[in-house]
Image (cartoon, rainbow, N blue to C red):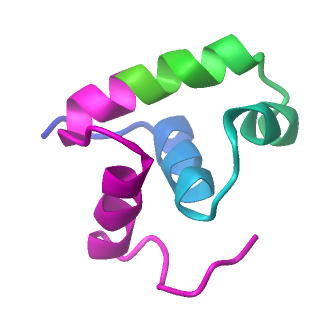
Amino acid sequence: MDTLTPSEKEIVILVAQGYKNREIAEKLSLAEQTVRNYLSAIYAKTGSKNRVGLTIFAMRARWIDSAREK
């Protein structure tokens, strides 16, 4: 697995917390397409196929706990 950048890690955490791409874009002052581009890179780096996979990845990495923080 390639190392995630701090920005990618932040996006993974937000995805795991249940934020939608549009909400992540607004929260991070990014374009929604930029968030989608980040997610494509994140999926490739983590081997995750979807948001559920990213959530599991974040939980295993102990970036979040099982409680939703949204």
Could you say where residue 17 lies in the image, as x and y percent from the top left? 62, 65
Looking at the image, the residue that sits furthest to the left is: 1
Report which quarter residue 21 is drawn in.
Answer: top right
Is residue 62 one of those drawn in magenta?
yes
Hey, which quadrant is residue 27 in on the image? top right
Q: Is residue 41 above or below residue 68?
A: above
Q: Residue at x 74, y 40 (%)?
A: 24
Q: Does the magenta stretch include residue 1?
A: no
Q: Could you tell me which quadrant the C terminus lies in?
A: bottom right
User: Which residues are the magenta region?
Assistant: 41-70
Figure quadrant of residue 1 = top left
Q: Where is residue 66 in the image (x, y as percent from the top left)?
A: 48, 85
Residue at (64% x, 15% y) in the render: 34
Please say if 15 is above or below 55.
above
| 18 w.r.t. 67: above or below | above
Left or right: where does residue 15 sit relative to residue 52?
A: right
Compared across the picture, whether 43 is left or right of 13 comes to left
- State the residue at coordinates (62%, 54%): 14
* Residue located at (70% from left, 77% from top): 69
Q: How many marks?
A: 0
State whether residue 5 is above or below residue 19.
above
Where is residue 7 drawn, in percent x and y?
56, 37
Q: Is residue 36 left or right of residue 52?
A: right
